[in-house]
Image (cartoon, grey):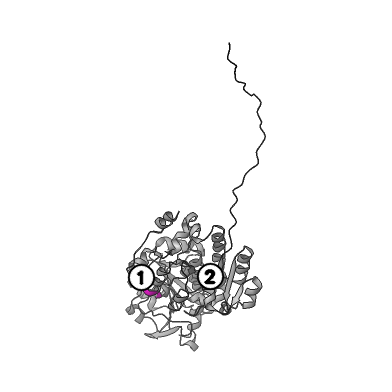
Amino acid sequence: MSKKQPVVSTSFSYETLEETLDVKVKRDGVTIGIPKEIAFQESRVALTPDAVAVLINNGHSVIVEHDAGEAAHYRDKEYSDAGAKIVHSREEVYKAPILVKSAPVIEEDLDLLQMNQVIISPLHLSVLEHGVLCAMMKKKVTALSFESLQDDTGAYPIVRSMSEIAGSAAMLIAAQYLGSANHGKGVLLGGISGIAPAKVIIIGAGIVGEYAARAALALGASVKVFDNNVSRLMRLQNTIGRRLWTSVIEPKLLAKQLRSCEVAVGAFPVESGRTPLLVTEEMVSGMRPGSVIIDASIDRGGCFETSEVTSHESPIYMKYGVIHYCVPNIPSGFARTASQAISNVIMPLLIEAGEDGGLENLAWHKLYLRNGIYLFKGHLTNFYLSQRFDLKYTDLNLLIASQR
């Protein structure tokens, strides 16, 4: 008896299937708090009303402390019209899971901080205190600093924006203090027909130095730029689009140029740690009386040996007859422009974090974001801070990997 052979179908269906898309799970909105800053003479606000409106339209909630944007000329009504909740209680703002500040965390903030809170703010290494950092660690805070925040190109968008403001403002400030009314030499920065322009020395060819040079040239000054990085000097020449007098930092040559200048701008760029002292007290003592020093590097210690931190209320002091302007937060004096620049970076970041289920999840996917995180759930992840304060350092990559 023969076996029955299996029947093989020879008809096939070649109909196309529906395309399936990877749709992200809709997340619940987060609550973001914007406090009014009470320290460092901070006039900026980290999120403008327009940015708040975008966040609220994306399903998030925003709590704004009364008059938080007043110094930057953003009224409470503008925030409430954007959909934010205006509160008079500082404690209520600090209950938000995500806190966005335009000034560093200070001692007065510590009792108000919540466990496992996310804080996005400047760090200001020169004024950071050991006790503040330890208290944030105890509350298992995740903290992201403006200064170290990178984008997907590896650039530092907030630092760049603030540097552009600081560089441009430095020359406007210098022009003001050269005037006789401010005990300056009574010299017009750009000069006039038949009279030589003022001589400006810029130490550092980074973003601050570049924009200081642009402003000085636009005002008609004579500009000389020093930097130890020849590539930066070459880039400066190319971006400005004209030949400039440039030099590496050779102490004797620098001292000679300082003796004959009207304005010296400290703008030496450093990625971490303290700015090196490039101008000695002896060099400063040799400068002309009534000349002006603008130390735009003072927020990282300053590059003039005679520099001491000043404030917007009392911005200058005299030493060896030289006017010293050493305000560490120059962009705060141009608060509205600075606020818009910060907001342009922070708002998209918050939207992305909300879509990804939080900053911690976003850091898993966006490796460049990790550079800005100096505290992760209470663990110190910044090596420089661990060395400076003798605190335990934990590698952020290992921490994030262990959370998965």
Tell me the kind of residue under disc 2: Ala
295 or 241: which is nearer to us? 295
Taking the spot 58% from the left edge, 12% from the top edge, the residue there is: 2
Looking at the picture, how far across and down is residue 116, in whole percent? 46, 66
Whichever of callouts 2 and 1 sits on the residue coming sooner in the sequence is 2
* Residue 189 visible in the current orientation: no
The residue that mark 1 highlights is 276
Verify whether residue 130 appears in magenta.
yes
Looking at the picture, how far across and down is residue 27, in whole percent? 58, 58
333 or 169: which is nearer to us? 333
Q: Residues within 10 Å of mark 2 (few under 14, many from 20)?
A: many
Which image quarter holds the N terminus? top right
Verify whether residue 193 appears in magenta.
no
Q: Is residue 182 above or below residue 219?
A: below
The residue that mark 2 highlights is 96
Looking at the picture, how far across and down is residue 112, in whole percent? 47, 75
Residue range in magenta is 127-131
Tell me the kind of residue under disc 1: Pro
